[in-house]
Image: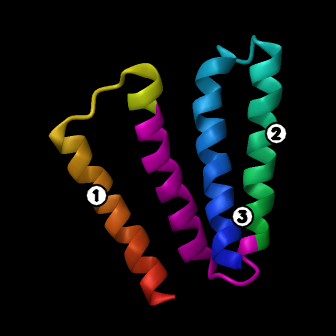
């Protein structure tokens, strides 16, 4: 169950990271409020997950999923480039996430 909570925390991390773009420097009220809510939920869920998962593993997985999801979100929503080099780097992050999960 802790890993599912961590996955949910990572999805909220993706949401707030992408939400930052929509806040336009925290000048738009609704996107700002939604982004802050996602930030809080992400950290609260992470805190709950680390009760059962080692902090190093949990934090690395949380940030790794957040990084991968945010890059994909940037590509889909904002037209960011997905170059072969970026793809290789994302696959390296993904391999680290899988490795940490398998070793837990």
Circle 2 sits in a helix, a strand or a loop, which is it?
helix
**What's drawn in magenta, residue-wise?**
49-73
Tell me if 87 is positioned left or right of 1 in this view. left
Determine the CA span between mark 3 and mark 1: 23 Å
Q: Residue at x 28, y 57 (%)?
A: 91
Say which element carries label 3: helix
Label 1 SS: helix
For disc 1, the marked residue is: 91
Mark closest to the chain's N terminus, 2 or 1: 2
Crowd rating for badge 3 (residues with CA inside 10 Å; few <14, some 14–19, many 20+): many
Residue furthest out toward the bottom? 103
Read off the residue under disc 3. 46
Numbered disc in front, either 3 or 1 = 1
Disc 2 target residue: 37
**Circle 1 residues within 10 Å: few <14, some 14–19, many ≥20:** few
* Residue 38 found in image quarter: top right
In the rendered image, residue 64 lying in the magenta stretch gets the answer: yes
> Residue at point 82% right, 15% down?
29
């Amino acid at each position: 169950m802790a890993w599912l909570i961590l996955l949910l925390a990572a999805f909220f991390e993706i949401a707030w990271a992408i939400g930052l773009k929509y806040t336009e420097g925290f000048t738009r009220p609704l996107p700002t409020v939604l982004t802050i809510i996602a930030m809080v939920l992400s950290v609260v869920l992470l805190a709950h997950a680390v009760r059962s998962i080692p902090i190093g593993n949990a934090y690395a997985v949380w940030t790794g999923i957040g990084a991968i999801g945010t890059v994909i979100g940037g590509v889909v929503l904002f037209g960011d480039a997905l170059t072969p080099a970026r793809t290789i780097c994302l696959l390296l992050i993904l391999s680290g996430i899988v490795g940490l999960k398998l070793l837990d």
